[in-house]
Image: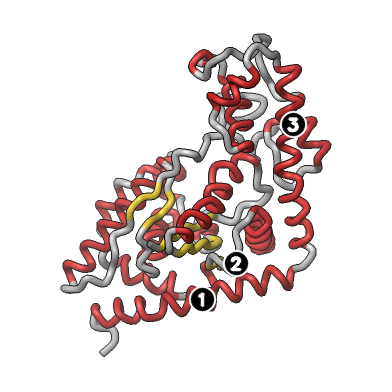
Amino acid sequence: MRVVSGIKPTGNLHLGNYLGAVKQWVAMQEEIQAAGGETMYFIADLHGLTEFIAPAELTANTIEMTATLVAAGIDPERSILFNQTRVPAHSELAWLLNNVARVGWLNRMTQFKDKAGKNREGASVGLYDYPVLMAADVLLYNGTHVPVGEDQKQHLELARDIAAKFNLDYGTELFTQPEPLISAAAPRIMSLRDASAKMSKSNPSEQSVVKLIDSDSVIADKFRKAKTDPDALPDSWEALEGRPEARNLVTIFAALADRTPEDVVAEFAGQGFGQFKPALADLAVAKLGPIRDEMVRLLNDRAAIDAILARGAEKARDLAAPVLADAQRAMGLLA
């Protein structure tokens, strides 16, 4: 079993990113390796180019993302951690797979339609084609499983279709068809000021998002000022239906504490948010503070980050080289 997953290098990672993705990766590192499998995590800097980003910002985001993953618990001695650019085989295999993928398949990708909006003619070719690069990211390592959310399941199906067509067209069994790995534990974290919207760094209100780089006092202040309703917590999770802000805060507490929302509600049943929010603030500071401190330490040691990415890329290149060569050989590019 080999799990392969990537994350785009965005700056100012927040609590939603951590609980929805990074924390899940750390758990997978433990679970998959305990079962004798392997985990590969990469910074998807090539995918970061699909919409314009200033070069210095992309570089800084890649460094920050690496520091965040390591600080959160991804161990570069146990998992292969690297950024795409350091493994040219990602781009090379993507071009080969472009000649296997069909335009009709890409036309059905809903995420391109969502991101391009009404300006499809003005979108980059990379934005249109990046599902093929995603397929290459996984097929290059014969990844057996890929952690996916609902918005990425369609892309994984495309990767499976490309793998099957390549094998059929060229009479080979080179590519494994990856399976989705869906974590039921991954929560959807909403804004602290408007629980109808996801937590996002693009929200104009600083109070709506808890950034991983925030100080202890800022984290505590944001939770204490989080929007809630005047009612006390009920004695069941189902009774929170129709109370989005309350459900969001309970969800965050449960995810940080590695407990179920039902368990959290049972503990605080009958208590108001004047009691619950300080408890949540204390928990968030206890969990996020050490991650922030380690992030800061790593960000002040650029050489250490470069060394981590270099070592990971070397391991990834060793795995990728024979697969790329076999694909080239199958297509007649190598004798």
Mark sitting on residue 315? 1
Query: Residue type at mark 2?
Result: Pro
Per the rendering, the mark at residue 281 is: 3
Quarter of the figure with the N terminus? bottom left
Which color mode does the image show?
A: secondary structure
Residue 244 on image: x %, y %: 56, 20
Q: Image point 71% across, 44% down: which residue?
A: 288
The numbered mark, 1 or 3, whose residue comes first in the sequence reads 3
In three-dimensional space, the C-alpha distance between marks 1 and 3, rounded to whole angstroms, equals 40 Å
Q: Nearer the viewer, residue 201 or 173?
A: 173
Measured as percent of width and height from the top left, residue 73 is found at 63, 56
Query: Does label 2 or label 1 sit earlier along the sequence?
Result: 2
What residue did someone put label 2 on?
A: 76
| Furthest residue in direction bottom, as rendered | 335
Outermost residue toward the right? 217
The foreground one among 196 and 284 is: 284
Q: Taking 314 as reference, is 296 left or right?
A: right
State whether residue 324 is above or below residue 158.
Answer: below
Q: Secondary structure at mark 3?
A: helix
Tell me: 161 left or right of 289: left
Seen at 30% across and 51% down, the residue is 157
**Quadrant of the image occupied by residue 326:** bottom left
Which residue is pictured at 22% across the width and 62% down the height? 164
